[in-house]
Amino acid sequence: MTSFRPAPGWLADAVFYQIYPQSFADSDGDGVGDFAGITERLGHLAWLGVNTVWLNPCFVSPFRDAGYDVADYLAVAPRYGSADGLAKLVDEARRQGIRVLLDLVAGHTSDAHPWFTASADDPDDDRYIWAPEGCPDGYVPSPGARPGAYLPNFFASQPALNFGHARQDPAEPWRLPVDAEGPRANRAALRSVIDHWLRLGLAGFRVDMAASLVKDDPGRRETAAIWTELRHWMDRAHPEAVLLSEWGDPEVSVPAGFHADFFLQFGGATDGLALRSLWSNGEGTVNEDWDPLDCFFDASGRGSPRPFLDAWQRACAALDGTGFISLPTANHDFSRLNCGPRTAEQLPVAFAFQLTWPTLPAIYYGDEIGMRYVPGLPDKEGSVLGPRYNRAGSRTPMQWDDSANAGFSTASADRLYLPVDPDPARPTVAAQRADDTSLLHLVRRLVALRTSRPELGSAGSVEVLHAGHPFVYVRGGRYLVVVNPRRDGASHRLDGYGAATDARPLEVSGVRVDGDTVTAEGFSYGIFALGR
């Protein structure tokens, strides 16, 4: 394994909070969220206890893919405000103990980027991947004077930057090796973009489609080599900054140089089974290619934590303490926890698990109050990926209070980036702040519990006592955690854990410890301090 500088000490204690900026808070009444709106709402995040914020892309873009089509890596999109507004957000967040990460799209740009418009007219430009004649499968015809076609990385409007091909093919003579001039220029540009923003006070990046750089790359070895080179540079130039990857395969991405990777709805040999086996209930964002499964956090009780456990154990063995795995509640591409048949009463047990497992927790904005995936929305900025996969349902405006537009914006409803959840019973921050029994207060207490007890964090050991219903594990030898996500009750004998008779409840709902037996009601959870 390549030797890197150890991750910055702060990362081990990170509690991430993902903000989709156009939907979080609108300060100027144009219907789109912005930097000033986020700055005004930082108090909510500080009160909640999160300490690291990740913003979805906020660079200049035509927004055909919600900002993941970048037209200028060094300028912010005017709809979010100015560079000064971003600097103010970062400074105010720092004063409140919160670091800010940006989202870096490394593998492609927008077709409106000046690099691409120049390349489309210059047959000698190798910044993108061009087939000089015809239009091979998967390629897009040239929009400029240059003949041939270009390779997109996602949508047709997102031409792939040329980081080279790992393998050459006589039938495709345009394939360049990774050390050719164009790929070298792109590696240098990637470093320059990272350096620019880190020098302005950002704490790091989440990297979009991090595995997509080098093409025809078996095992992603050449792509990994690029990130390894970049990580060694960052260790020297920006040792306190971090790189998080959208790779979905920590066993590959962290040894390659990332400080952390997310379990995602895709990635790795099982195509994201670890995350989907926990949360995905067949509603919301559904890829038709996914094999049907019963998720563990489902009322039926047919699911199992075993697919997650197996993936987590494999990844931990591969990482061997060199980096971290992050477990999100949801993200901008995947259904919220509150989706389809899952009800509000099922959400607390999910958070009790997520915030006591030794992964870095990532809370998607609004999940802390139980915002739901809103079905039936129109396509918005490329949100639709398939007949049952519309990402817009996870991107609706944050619900702050009972005022117009749920306090997100003063704009008229028809000008909002996306409609507010029309459910009259929709949860709000204000209502839940006023209710000590709310999900929001529970999440806050769980974050505080994790933060104040190192054994419940990323470094604490975990011993699984029962991988079923209830799911029972011990953190750091000192804290017993019991979660039962199904509707029916369940019990388990704590063989060998006689000291559990001295279990002291810290955060409990519906769980009892009687002698050597744990009894859990439906949708229950319990965190106990053990007297041993």
Image (tube, grey):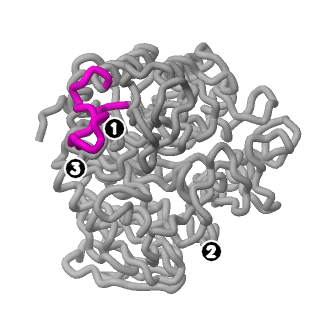
Image position, residue 255 (x, y; %): 20, 42
Image position, residue 85 (x, y; %): 62, 18
The disc at residue 341 is: 2
Q: Horizontal placement of 260 versus 437: left or right? A: left
State how far apart marks 1 and 2 are (Cα): 38 Å
Q: Residue 253 is drawn in which quadrant? A: top left
Q: Assess whether residue 512 is covered by the magenta stretch.
A: no
Whether residue 118 is visible = yes
Mark 3: secondary structure:
helix
Q: Amino acid at mark 3?
A: Pro
Residue closer to the observer: 511 or 426: 426
Query: Where, quadrant-wise, is the N terminus in this rendering?
Result: top left
State how far apart marks 2 and 3 are (Cα): 40 Å
| Residue found at x 21% / y 26% | 179
Image position, residue 114 (x, y; %): 53, 19
Q: Nearer the viewer, mark 2 or mark 3?
A: 3
Mark 2: secondary structure:
loop
Residue marked by disc 1? 213
| Residue found at x 55% / y 30% | 111
The magenta segment: 162-182
Residue marked by disc 3? 218
Nearest to N terminus: mark 2 or mark 3: 3
Whether residue 90 is visible = no
Q: Residue 422 is drawn in which quadrant? A: bottom right
Q: Assess whether residue 165 is covered by the magenta stretch.
A: yes
Nearest to N terminus: mark 1 or mark 2: 1
